[in-house]
Image (spheres, rainbow, N blue to C red):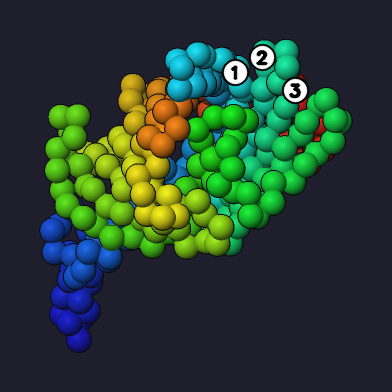
Amino acid sequence: MKLIVIISTLLSLIIFNPNSGFSESSEEKGLAIAQEDDKRDNGFNDFTASMIMILKNRQGEESLRYIKNKTLEVENDGDKSLSIFERPRDVKGTALLNFTHKTGTDDQWLYLPALKRVKRISYANKSGSFMGSEFAFEDITSQEVEKYTYKWVRDEEYQSEKCFVFERYPAYKNSGYTRQVVWLDKKNYKVLQIEFYDRKNTSLKTLTQSNFKQYLGKFWYPGTMYMENHQTGKSTLITWENYKFNNGLRENDFNKNSLKRAR
């Protein structure tokens, strides 16, 4: 009886290990890859960081946004985050609060200082542009495993790194995408590129991530995120810096009242 249990356990490890090559199906292998990626990103507790966002229109004209970010890991749910615009003057004090959930639609609130009010982002508007950028509201919440179904497509080399290539399909209503194609490096599970397809399954935009650094001896975060919209000719470049972990952030730091007092 013990031998049967041991054999069964070993078979399960082989089937669901994304590096084994023995997945029962492309869907199960895709899910196993996503689950391993999620497992490697757990345990950071909280962090703060600074962002510089450069918006570029079709004519090449640029505008800059300086943003401070706070993120809290929540047990048994998605992360909570608060993004506060510090410059330029016309957007200073604008703040976005994200409550990501493993299932269902994320909760998001936007504080507009000119109106001195908090606006809830409707469930039907998650595909809308975040502050004029090429990132949608649904792009800037934590990408929980349960929010998608998956399908492994192939393995290939990208940017001199061996990668899994898999598709993920939004499981929630009102997504602006039919699917996303993800390039994830096999060694450190860094997301190097994502191709987004709109509701007509037409190529919409591509996110490229680079300049990764390792934090706390475990977590790999990109220093640069570049989103290019193939349909409009616009792009958004985000650079991250000044990461600080384990700041003692609590859930009380992430509520609608925190939007109005955000600095």
Whether residue 228 sits left or right of residue 22 in the image: it is right
Q: Nearer the viewer, residue 76 or 99?
A: 99
Helix, strand or loop for disc 2? strand
Q: Are marks 2 and 1 in contact (CB under 8 Å)?
A: yes
Q: Identity of the amino acid at label 1?
A: Arg
Q: Residue furthest bottom?
A: 1
Whether residue 48 sits left or right of residue 225 in the image: it is right
Quadrant for residue 104, please give it.
bottom right
The residue that label 2 is drawn on is 87
> Residue at 33% across / 60% down in the picture?
150
Q: Is residue 91 above or below residue 216?
A: above
Image quadrant containing the C terminus: top right
Q: Is residue 234 above or below residue 136?
A: above
Q: Is residue 45 visible?
A: no
| Mark earlier in primary sequence (2, 1) | 1
Q: Which mark is residue 45?
A: none
Label 2 neighbour load within 10 Å: few <14, some 14-19, many 20+? some
Helix, strand or loop for disc 3? loop
> Residue at 69% across / 46% down in the picture?
121
The residue that label 1 is drawn on is 65
